[in-house]
Image (spheres, grey):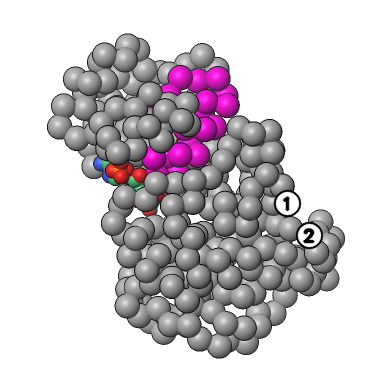
Amino acid sequence: MKAIALREYGSADDLRLVDLPDPKVGPAEVLIRVKAAGINPVDWKLAGGGLDALMEVRFPLVPGWDVAGVVERVGLDAGEFAVGDEVFGYIRKDWVQQGAYAELVTANVRMLAKKPRSLDWAQAAGVPLAGQTAYRSLKRVGLTAGETVLIHAAAGGVGSFATQIAVALGARVIGTASERNHDYLRALGAEPVTYGEGLAERLREFGPIDAAVDFVGGDAVEVSRQFVSAHRIASVANPEVGPHGYVWVRPDGAELAELARLADDGKLTVHVDHALPLAEAAEGWRLSQSGRTRGKIVLTV
Ligand SMILES: NC(=O)c1ccc[n+]([C@@H]2O[C@H](COP(=O)([O-])OP(=O)(O)OC[C@H]3O[C@@H](n4cnc5c(N)ncnc54)[C@H](OP(=O)(O)O)[C@@H]3O)[C@@H](O)[C@H]2O)c1
């Protein structure tokens, strides 16, 4: 199979399109013919060695934890899915080597859900990691209908899902973004506010805030603490919130099925900022590294 791989820790410049053996299919796994693979910032952070202390990484490394595709083969005990099923998933394994930037990838059935019919392949591949991070973060702060949530980096991958999930829940959403994304946030149902110097003063005009989720780091948690009690702040980027508030997304097919349902109910969609062919993965990483992604960047296979 063709795949994008790295021979050792490196950057976008080190990504190569290579031929690799087709992966073996474990008993609880299915083999997926990849239609699209989502790009997440963690892909290039991991490839650069940034998670070496946390994760067992083996080379050649095929990056990519988000996939949408068609089941091509079913493992010995993986009857939850059948050949031909259209699936998607956040498919991080316990050790990292065989990812989704490839023509074929295997995944444990517990990480997969049926692809929502309302999303095309590129959109579906954009959902799993970021969508589940958003879902988990809002759950962590216990957001309920009628409450107001502050979402830091609301226009990015995770933030755009958090905004839509919170709106679907019946919450009021205040979302931080640069001005070029304010209309985008309004279209998702949020009230936009510009981040940076003076954010706290601007936030005071919105009235009481019940919970906050941070998808960017920096001073987002510090600003949130001026409005929200500590146990209702979650962050994916700032360990200062402690284990009750720090979110590290886990693969979970059941959670993903709930997101698929939201999509098919018309409550969750995906803005694909860039869809690039697999061979242009390096360009996808450079775009992601700019920190200006609106929605998601996806590779089509
Ligand atoms: N711990 C976990 O499990 C986990 C899971 C997923 C992601 N993450 C991390 O969470 C972060 C976000 O991920 P992502 O996929 O959403 O990234 P992304 O899509 O690349 O985020 C880009 C967005 O960030 C916004 N942004 C940049 N600086 C900002 C600031 N200071 N304040 C508010 N918004 C800002 C940009 O909006 P403008 O263009 O308007 O500036 C852009 O829309 C990354 O660091 C990622 O590694 C962690």
Query: Residue placed at 34% from the left, 60% from the top?
Result: 287
Q: Main secondary structure of the magenta part?
A: helix
How far apart are labels 1 and 2 at the CA level? 7 Å
Does 15 appear above or below 106?
below
Dot 1 crowding, Cα within 10 Å, few <14, some 14–19, many 20+: some
Residue 107, above or below 177: below
Q: Is residue 121 left or right of residue 65?
A: right
The answer to whether marks 1 and 2 mark residues whose Cβ atoms lie closer than 8 Å is yes
| Residue designated by label 1 | 114
Q: Assign a secondary structure to mark 2.
A: loop
Specify whether 198 is left or right of 43: left
Picture coordinates of residue 232, whole percent (x, y): 41, 25
Q: Quadrant of the N terminus?
A: bottom right
Dot 1 or dot 2, earlier in sequence: 2
Residue 7 lies in quadrant: bottom left
Look at mark 2 in the image and give the residue it sits on. 85
Q: Residue at x 83, y 71 (%)?
A: 76
SS under mark 1: strand
Membership of 171 in magenta stretch: yes
Q: Which residues are magenta?
A: 155-174
